[in-house]
Amino acid sequence: MNAMNTLPKYIVTLCDGPTCMHQRSKTLKAVIEEELKKRGLYETTSLVLSGCLGMCNKSPIVIVNPGYTIYGGVSPEDIPEIVEEHLVKGKPVARLAIEEDYLYNRFYRVFGDVAFFGQQMRIALRNCGIMDPESLDDYLSLRGYEALAKVLTDMSPAQVISEVKKSGLRGRGGAGFLTGLKWENTARQKSDEKFVICNADEGDPGAFMDRSTIEGDPHTVIEGMIIGGYAIGAHRGFVYIRAEYPLAIRRLRKAIDEARREGLLGTTILDSAFSFDIEIKLGAGAFVCGEETALIHSIEGRRGMPRPRPPYPSQKGLWGRPTLINNVETWANIPVIVLDGADWFTTIGTEKSKGTKVFALAGNVQNTGLVEVPMGTTLREIIYDIGGGIPDNKKFKAVQTGGPSGGCLPEQYLDTRVDYESLQAAGSIMGSGGMIVMDEGVCMVNIAKFFLEFTQNESCGKCTPCREGTKRMLEILQRITKGEGIEGDIEKLERLGTMISKASLCGLGQSAPNPVLSTLRHFRAEYEEHIKNKRCPAGTCVDLLSYTITDGCVGCGLCRKKCPVGAISGEPKQRHVIDQAACINCGQCYAACKFNAIQKS
Amino acid sequence: MKQMITIYVNDKAYQVESGQTIMQATDGIGFRIPRLCYHPKLSIEGACRVCIVEVEGARNYIASCSYPVNDGMRIYTNTVPLRRARRDIVELILDNHPDDCHTCERDGICELQRLAYSMGIRRRHFEGEKKNYEKDLSSISVIRDPNKCILCGRCVRLCSEVQHVNALGYANRGFQTVVMSAYDRPFSESVCTNCGQCINVCPTAAFVEKNYTQELFDKLNDSSVIKIAQVAPSVRAAIGEAFGIPPGQAFEREVAAALKKLGFTYVFDTQFGADLTIMEEASEFLERIQGNGVLPMVTSCSSAWMKYVEQFYPDLLPNVSTCKSPMSMLSAMAKTYFAEKIKIDPAKICVAAIMCCTAKKYEAARPELMVNGLPATDIVVTTREIAWMIRSAGIDFLHIEGEDFDAPLGLSSGAGAIFGVTGGVMEAAIRTAYELYTGETLIDIEVNAIRGFQGIKEGKVLMDGKEIRVAVVHGLGHVYQILDMVRNEPGRFHFIEIMGCPGGCIGGGGQPYAGSNSVPLDEEVLQKRAQALYGLDRERTFRRSHENPHVQKLYKEFLGRPLSSLSHKLLHTHYTPKEPRGIITREQTA
């Protein structure tokens, strides 16, 4: 970065989250640097690569401050114009500025003055996107490590635990156990050694909350862990993170090194009597290693397989010692709770679910990306107000929360408030924060099959219900989507699903049937349609589709040429016909027809 | 101090000790919750989920094997939904298991089959794809059939927790999960010591011994061959169990008779080999003591232990006695001394060893044990295999008239009999070494300090004022403790007995499967088998190996004296360090 002796005139922030990185944010940075140098502005402009801003659908993102101008979809060719017009002449380029996303704008305008505003509220992600994640100074300037200093100078471990308990913070990894209670349980254990673990083994398909938190603000996780170590009396911490997150690992490593260099980690932290250090352990990508006992086995060098609890990790965890394990988002909340107090924290959220939750909003929704909202926000607000609704004028069909362990909720549940109890009552779960929106073109049987395929592949293979049971459920779903479903299949799915969720060893198995059970609960008719009438109402189950050519056919012959199996015949300028016996339902004719003369049913 | 608490099982109140699991507590008050992966000698796996119960207030079913009882807990063991869930779980296991019970080697002595029947599974709801793996036939002792594996994990836990060998582990995920050796190499190339304990704890037939019964029947029906059998001590102590007799009854002369009925020309006794082993081993020990040889000396009878030391403690090979095992000594005598005696070409002799052990199959194939270019032992069959052969040949074992073993290799002392129990070799050696060293007869010959089933036992014997410190270890899992002592304090012991299997040979990997009223590795069963052998010892006229007149005759007529050059050639062997797959050497780590 360019060194600066005086305050910069402009701060140009480039989002370097996963999506923007894919859109070559670094190339943009190089172009901006070049343009700045050309105009002699390099010394007076601060250029920052930030963590994920969450506006992934407008990627790549460039923000110019002061003024809070957000440019979206910026290409290298746009740079000279932005630099010339905005940075030289002071006139934002209206053509590229994002205006319709008032929410994002509002969020940035208010940040730092008022803690909550609008429908998004950022606590875990408070620094993501606005600071340089590789700069300890940036973090310090945003009240970084103040909470740690406060804890080490003014608070006893018991006071820290009491504050966390009072805050009502619950584990953000999925189960929603009271964090303070977990801390208390671990602190109460007598042992020669205790450990702290950060669970960053984010494995839900499409989820990237933890990744973005670490990539955007690694120090907050470190600070949270040190405070946790102080509270329970541990001196060693581990971050268990997927090896597939190289940028997060690099930034975390750098942050740990820097914190160590500055006396924030290691022996006698901030000249107190407390010592604590953190090691990074890389996971090999097994979904089940997100389960705490499996994760502990993995750190110990053994196969990642869950074991029965009790004993809980708080009693016997890593190497048989009491271990405090929380996920990334939970840790990221800790410094804020310590600094601003439990009293403030409990004003956010609902009665039983305090604070905010980060969601990775994905699927058939206008604005995909990361959102952090207060607990109690409704699904409708997230999907329509923040997410901007369903694209292409399609109808909303369902929203899936909680990843492969969660469930699908239909339209009548859109006013469900996002908190642990309400989502569970509706038949889904909070989970770690996956949120996939589905429009009318999505087949719920197929979706259930997709998730079950995932859990079956990722099952550790230890307990019978999960290993064998999900396989049998998957086989039934495969049959149904192929049109080979038979009377009684639904009952078998329910029988197996209920047994698996009640009898499996770990949370992964217990929740594995959720996608099936929840779709059976809310979309039973769709299953029945597949089984009884061999029809896929959403038109996605390939084996259940049939294509026919209607009167609109002009006999152009394009479909005949496109058909890979020669199933279409017809004379030029005559209506063509599809041989249903030969047709493989690939849909190429449907896509090719320029006259809308092919009907899919 | 244990506190008593009240639990309610199916709404009835019971007082139980706190700190127990639900399963332990209910076992103590007359229940037996169905179970599968649980084993009292192994760590809690909680994998099969068969032992689930309902606990009031719990959202899910609770695995009773792992969950602790607490005061006021209300447990339901037999509700209708619970019964159905358990039944479905066992059906799911069956659905991924071959339906070949009527041709399966477990011969109906199968925990899964019993469990399925008790669950009332009369029809199947969920059948689908089944796993399909190749059998691993590479090992000379232990066959792996992953298709029959139900992933209860007992073998994996046993191999690591009881035996500390770690030849087995899990690989892959989900439906593809499978138990295999390191890097999925053939089992013969793994660190497996062939002890066969995995066979003993397997609830199905995922592990079985390599079966040589057909080869043996072929030989028995070949009139051009002299068929010699030898029977290990522990076979007679346990074979009754294979015919429905409760543990603890020895069938010594019955076995000899049955083998003769099967068609063996001569039936010898491995216990004769044991007496011979004691003559050589006691002499070797005295030589080491008197001549500043490497101490402590460690016994070499157990084949699993021999592979273990070669691959894990090659630096201690000089401590291991050079004596062959009783089986190999007897086979060597059969093909030399006895062949000469009856004037038969040793190539025409087939020696079949009836052993309680699967590792003996591996031992028999060791090239360094060949005698004059011929394998000393031709075929090894286990107690299970011979019991099957006896039944298969239509011999009424339970109503058979007992017969004597044949001379000259069939007479044995009581010392030879107790070889089968942990501590027996040491006790037998002390009986003889004492007399060889002091010239006096040891009066109190039952050395109680080294009897019993503690993992490591230590004892002292005074010989002419010289204190001889001995240790006895059984079960490979305890071996590292004693060998680390040897490395760190070489002077601590003079003589150590090591047996690979828990309980010694009576607990061997080739013994009859646990019946419906016991579990594998059941200590009570092992105790009873031990008592059977101690009983044989007490009934013997000669209880010291050197008193065996046929052993004396063998030395006089053929070997000369213990440790003679002929003895060295025929009764002693050597060892070589092994580096099987699955071990990363220190050089590779660096």
Image: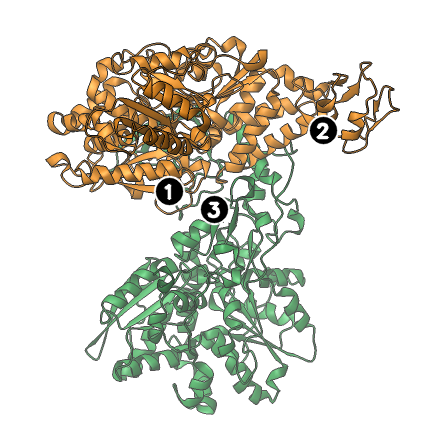
Decide which of A397, A384 is in the foreground and name it.
A384
Q: Is residue B71 left or right of residue B102?
A: left
Q: Element under label 2?
A: loop
Above or below for A538 versus B35: above
Question: Can you see residue B23?
Answer: no
Question: Can you see residue A458?
Answer: yes
Dot 1 or dot 2, earlier in sequence = 1
Query: Residue A349, how many percent across, how many down?
Result: 33, 12
Mark number, residue B153: 3
Chain containing the residue with disc 2: A
- Kind of residue indicated by mark 1: Leu
- Kind of residue indicated by mark 2: Cys
The quadrant holding residue A290 is: top left
Above or below for B374 versus B185: below
The reply to the same-chain question for discs 3 and 2 is no
Mark number, residue A586: 2
- Kind of residue indicated by mark 3: Gly
Q: How is the image coloured?
A: by chain
Chain A rendered in what hue? orange
Q: Element under label 3?
A: loop
Query: Residue A99, how many percent across, how many down?
Result: 42, 12
Q: Which residue is mark 1?
A: A282
Chain containing the residue with disc 3: B
- Chain ID for green: B
Observer-side mark, 3 or 2, equals 2
Query: Residue B331, how many percent across, how many down?
Result: 52, 78
Decide which of B120, A74 is in the foreground and name it.
A74
Q: Is residue B429 left or right of residue A540?
A: left
Within 10 Å of disc 2 (Cα), the crowding (few <14, some 14-19, many 20+) is some
Observer-side mark, 3 or 1, equals 1
The reply to the same-chain question for discs 1 and 2 is yes
As measured in the structure, the alpha-carbon distance from the residue carrying label 3 to the one carrying label 2 is 45 Å
